Amino acid sequence: MSRFRRRITVITLHSAVVSVIASTVAGCQPVFARTDSPSVLAQAPYQRQEPALSAAPLYSQRQYAAHSVESSPKLDGKGDDAVWSSVPWSEDFTDIEGPTRATPRQRTRVKMVWDENALYVLAELSETDLWATLKNHDEIVFHDNDFEIFVDPDGDTREYYEVEVNALGTIFDLYLPQAYRAGAKANHAWNAVGMKVAIGLDGTLNDSSDVDRSWCVEMAMPWSMFTPVAESRGDVTFQKVARPPNAGDQWRINFSRVQWTLEKSGKSYEKVAGKSEDNWTWTPQWIIDMHVPQWWGVVTFVGPTVQKKENSK
């Protein structure tokens, strides 16, 4: 019989140093639901020639209604907090180029809520082979299997923020004043200060002797984290300040999962030589390029979700 162990790691990013502050053992209880709706975000005045799409778009950007909550979810890597049970899951991730490509081999879904302090994200990633190797902050985490979030706070497709994390909890974070195709360079010195991340593993990391089930990612991203960086070149900064959203505000956000094809190597795994990675996203980019914010999803910040209360008898 396979032995499944769930390891939970909670990290807080203070500067460039990630410190482990908790580690326990527990179970995982994923729950799934679904939402669908077309994008209604108005076109931003920012215009730049778009790269040629490799697949014809079959639908507009996906949307998610992020509800405000009175109490923040407990970040412990379990994903079973009552706050999470009150909101739906997103659609299953699809191939980055859209559903005309192969359906992802592993299921990925996310949830989002918010309060006056932060944006909270829960991701559940099915996984038969838990694997991660990179351990240092700002290593190129997508060289491992990883989970990524891209956030454009005012939806104008200019200043945006990217965070990647692997199953070890190693973080790669960066800031871009504009997309790469606009001539921008990523600022790797930027750090997601104040962000908290909890990783839960349902299985055994880097052990090819068993079959794993999943890993969970919980994030708390404080609003202060989304502060645009003043570039030394004197570039105009269009996003003026970092602030909590108001109900009704819409941000452009997308999620990506990088997945490598692995083979057993001794007691662990290694990448299959010559095999490129798969890229699975919440809403398709229609091209293998996450840095086209015009195709990110639309997240609308709404008021509190109504929670049902059972009458006592």
Image: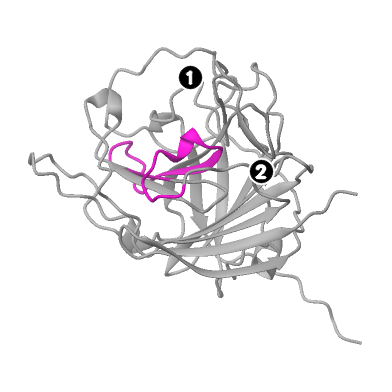
The residues colored magenta run 135-163
Q: Cβ–Cβ below 8 Å for labels 1 and 2? A: no
Residue indicated by mark 2? 130
Helix, strand or loop at label 2? It is: loop
Q: Is residue 289 left or right of residue 231?
A: right
Point out residue 81 in the picture as x, y percentages from the top left corner. 67, 68
Q: Residue at x 36, y 46 (%)?
A: 138
> Considering depth in this image, is 182 or 217 the residue closer to the camera?
217
Amino acid type, callout 2 = Leu
Residue indicated by mark 1? 287
> Considering depth in this image, is 140 or 160 the residue closer to the camera?
140
Q: Is residue 19 visible?
A: yes
Q: Is residue 73 visible?
A: no
Q: Residue furthest front?
A: 266
Q: Mark 1: few, some, or many residues within 10 Å (few <14, many ≥20)?
A: many
Q: Residue at x 50, y 12 (%)?
A: 54
Q: CA distance from mark 1 to mark 2?
A: 27 Å
Point out residue 167 in the picture as x, y percentages from the top left corner. 57, 49
In the image, residue 135 above or below residue 14: above
Q: Residue at x 57, y 51 (%)?
A: 65
Amino acid type, callout 1 = Ile
